[in-house]
Image (spheres, rainbow, N blue to C red):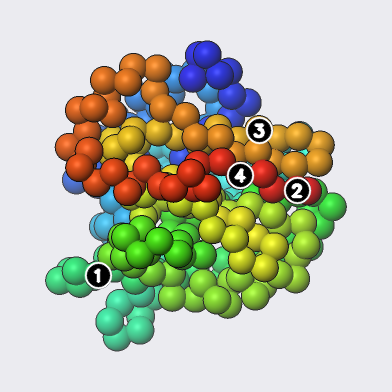
Amino acid sequence: MSELQPDFLIVTGDIARPDSRDAVFAARDLMDSLGFPYYPMGGSSDFCYEQSRQWFTEAFGAHLPESRTWYSFTQGEIHICVLDAWWLWDDGTVMPFSQRGNSTPRWIVPPDQLEWLDGDLAEHDEEATIIAMHPPLILPQMKLARDSALQRGALENAGLLLDRLKAHAQVKLLLSGSAHAHYIAKQEGLTQVVTGSLTQYPVEFRDIHIHEDRFEVHTRGLSNAVYASQSLLREREWTRGRDEDRFAVIPL
């Protein structure tokens, strides 16, 4: 980070194990030590329990533009909307915490967030926009990555959300985590960029360059390459993604 000097960081979920409030605050302190502005969102590891979102907003309140887990902000001429998918239980109930005994999680963006998103995008219709949320909207073509994404939890109303985004031509880029693999997928003018876990081979992150006429998405490893060689999942080299999953240009 000190070499790249980023303007800000977007953290696409699974920040801390949710075992305790202390764990969330410890993760916050570590991220604060980086010394750069960052915008966090929760993932399946962060929002398991009834108290999870309260812990999250208490710990990261200084980094949230609003005191809730979904929000938007503008950086320069770029607008970013962060969504918070909730758990969909087997009986169709939408809940903020996971269902015990449900081994395959299912996600949904709640209706109130969809309505908020429509209004927010209408208000910022002249700014190139990024949508960020933990589960991806667009699934990969590669079978291994697709299976991994589905095992981590499918977004049940992804089609509905994509239809809404099509009505807002300024939306260009979707950022997600969850799948535990790198991939880039395109669908009807939208580019989905999914980034694998920073603790998982090949231990990398995305470096997004914002230009007047385009986004450029680069993939970078840590300065100490030993971390990648020590990854417990090194044998799963498909998590690195194909060459086309590691760089993208998105015209604005």
Tell how many labels: 4
Q: Which residue sits furthest bottom? A: 91
Marks 2/4: CA–CA distance: 10 Å
Where, by quadrant of the figure, is residue 85 drawn? Answer: bottom left
Q: Secondary structure at mark 3?
A: strand
Q: Earlier in the sequence, mark 1 or mark 2?
A: 1
Q: Are marks 2 and 4 in contact (CB under 8 Å)?
A: no
- Asked if residue 141 is positioned above or below residue 53 in the image, the reply reads below
Distance, label 4 to label 1, CA atoms, is 31 Å
**Amino acid on which the number 2 mark rests in the picture:** Pro
Q: Viewed as shown, does residue 169 lie left or right of 12?
A: right
Q: Residue furthest left?
A: 101
Which residue carries the number 3 mark?
209
- Residue for point 49% across, 76% down: 157
Which SS class for mark 2? strand
Please name whichever residue, 241 or 47, is drawn nearer the observer in this view of the structure. Answer: 241
Q: Earlier in the sequence, mark 4 or mark 3?
A: 3
Q: Which residue is mark 1?
A: 104
* Amino acid type for the residue under numbered disc 3: His
Q: Are marks 4 and 3 in contact (CB under 8 Å)?
A: no
Which residue position holds label 2?
251
Please report the residue visible at 50 percent of the width from the left and 35 percent of the height from the top: 219
Rendering coords of residue 70 (x, y %): 53, 54
The image's mark for residue 248 is: 4
Are the two marked residues, 4 and 1, in contact with CB atoms closer than 8 angstroms? no
Residue type of the residue flagged with mark 4: Ala
Q: Residue at x 56, y 35 (%)?
A: 218
Against 128, is 217 above or below?
above
Most extreme residue toward the front is 243
